[in-house]
Amino acid sequence: MSTKPKIPTIWDIPREELFAPGHRMCQGCGAAILMRHITKALGKDAIIVEATGCVEVTTTVYPQTAWKHPWLHIAFENAAAGASGVEAAIKAMKRKGVIPKDKKVKVVAIGGDGGTFDIGLQALSGMLERRHNVLYIVYDNEAYMNTGIQRSGATPYKAWTTTTPVGKVWRGEWRPKKDIMGIVLAHRVPYAATVNPAYITDLYMKVRKAVEIEGPTFIHAFSPCTPGWRIDPALTVTVSRLAVQTGVWINYEVENGEFRVTTPVPKRKPVKEYLRLQGRFRHLTEEEIAEIQRMVDEEVERINKLVGKTVIGPVVE
Amino acid sequence: MTAQLPGWKSLPPGAVITRPGSTVEYKTHDWRTLRPVIDQERCIRCRLCWLYCPEGTIIELDKPYTTKTGRKYTRTYEINYDYCKGCGICAQECPAKAIKMVEEVR
């Protein structure tokens, strides 16, 4: 049985900022929008454990920090392990009476796609399997952006990066994106969801829900990167919205095995509209776009089958 | 930079940062080449610019405003130009086209 809380509107998001300005994220960074609203949704009683990544290096340039929460920096591979330790310490402190037993402290681990899909995968798997009460958030900008756009397991098919260049032999990344949600759901977690910065109320609701649920929870966030994706900084939200409207990204949640698409798209736009805004897909030929369209169609079909009805509609030109 | 840096003896153990939200000391306004300007007459107070700003530089104020045509609003949105990096998301997302990006002149 799923709990159905009141769907928040844009006016339910608190005005108070828990993520300070003055951080060094790029102009129009998608992850900055995500972090602002994730901290708002978490509220004050949270401990954040962050893996190395874009957000970590840009928000905590010594001797300053943009975070107003207790914040712990962990190496690239062990954000989930660090968060497990924090959660275990809170349990022990409650048992020994150091902090009140009914005090609710949310433990949140945040990692980039490199720190989650590739380097931090075993720590994440361990955390999920040991059933720690931690929310893990991955902001997925689809490559190692902070070190100079190297490919990661999250890089989509045919995307240009500095380590999958476009030339006579190579046409960008030739391997499809890793299905991290599939890996996480295979651990039978009580809650997992995908969020998108263009749909903030959806994000807000999912983060609130995920921290309330006892046990390991996971959120996969779409995070456009202006220098890495070669997009205009003003188009960050436009690209995010197009990703949902074209079916490249699907906003869904899985609660105790129950699959629900939170942003239904009755009429899908062709994937070309999403690809043409980004410089990393500039080299694509018509055949390659058709191939990507076919892959998206297959994924949409799979999701529709899981839900049991057509929530993501056919492509309408 | 001629500022006197602290020595290792005066730093806290592990060099932890003890001041939350201290990046406010670092003003990012000089990253900007285009400056967003809100036309208060056209603004419909939909909150979208506030929502999508990556820096949180759009400030929501409980300041009443009456337009020339007599529409009353209880809120006003203003921009904190100390931190705005000039990405232009607000102007792009504004449904009323009330935000214009103008060239920054210093």
Image (cartoon, coloured by chain):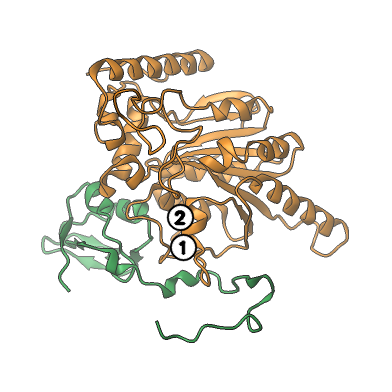
Chain colours: A orange, B green
The first of marks 1 and 2 along the sequence is: 1
Residue A3 in view, yes or no: no
Residue at left 30%, top 54%?
B49
Q: CA distance from mark 1 to mark 2?
A: 7 Å
Residue that numbered label 1 is attached to = A17
Q: Secondary structure at mark 2?
A: helix
Work out whether B45 lies above or below A246. Answer: below
Q: Residue A248 sits in which quadrant?
A: top left
Name the spot of residue A44 as percent of width and height, x first.
59, 61
Q: Which mark is residue A82?
A: none
Seen from the viewer's position, the closer of residues A240 and A65 is A65
Q: Which amino acid type corresponds to the residue marked 1 in the rendered image?
A: Glu
Residue at left 52%, top 67%?
A65
Q: Is residue B20 left or right of residue A124?
A: left
Name the spot of residue B53 as percent of width and height, x first.
34, 55
Seen from the viewer's position, the closer of residues A92 and A283 is A283
Work out whether B39 lies above or below A297. Answer: below
Q: Which amino acid type corresponds to the residue marked 2 in the rendered image?
A: Arg
Residue at left 53%, top 63%?
A67
